[in-house]
Image (cartoon, rainbow, N blue to C red):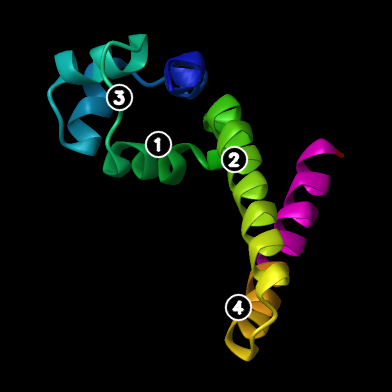
Amino acid sequence: MNNNINTLADLRTAAGIQLQDLAYLIGIDHGHLQKIEIGDRDPSVTVILLYHMLFKARLEDMFADLYANLHAQLFERSETLIAKLERKQSPKSIHRLESITKIVNSLDQDHYELVN
């Protein structure tokens, strides 16, 4: 996450909020928040969601590099699973194949929307 941690500090400073004020709002020590913003610590899910809520920031934008990497890994694993299920061709695997294919198609759509 360190590649995009500065985004958290950027969101805060763009809103004109002091570090200690934001720390109070989200309920953590300002020293801990500073370590998160400079990349010495990873933010918790709670901190990430609070930044998202307070600054109306899209998660994809806050962690663009991580999001893109996870998206690519998920897509690759999905394609591998589809290939395995296609080889089996049992009734159960056909149902699983249909479900996974829906997910992959939505991943394709998400990627298309992020790129364009």
Callout 4–callout 2 Cβ contact below 8 Å: no
Q: Give, as a single range, the part of the protein colored magenta.
A: 103-115
Q: CA distance from mark 1 to mark 3?
A: 13 Å
Q: Quadrant of residue 86?
A: bottom right
Label the magenta part by its dominant secondary structure: helix
Q: CA distance from mark 4 to mark 2?
A: 19 Å
In the image: residue 12, left or right of residue 57: left
Label 4: which residue?
96
Is label 2 in a helix, a strand or a loop?
A: helix
Nearest to viewer (mark 2 / mark 3): 2
Q: Nearer the viewer, residue 13 or 9?
A: 9
Label 3: which residue?
42
Label 2: which residue?
73
Question: Which quadrant is the N terminus positioned in?
Answer: top left
Q: Residue at x 59, y 25 (%)?
A: 65
Is label 3 in a helix, a strand or a loop?
A: loop
Q: Earlier in the sequence, mark 3 or mark 4?
A: 3
Is label 1 in a helix, a strand or a loop?
A: helix
> Among all residues in the image, which is located at the extreme left?
29
6 relative to 83, above or below:
above
Label 1: which residue?
51
In the image: residue 14, left or right of residue 41: right
Please provide percent x and percent y for residue 94: 68, 82
> Among all residues in the image, which is located at the extreme bottom?
91
Residue 48 sits inside the magenta stretch: no
- How busy is the neighbourhood of tag 3: few (under 14 within 10 Å), some, or many (20 plus)? some
The kind of residue tagged 1 is: Tyr
The kind of residue tagged 2 is: Gln
Nearest to viewer (mark 1 / mark 2): 2
- How busy is the neighbourhood of tag 4: few (under 14 within 10 Å), some, or many (20 plus)? some
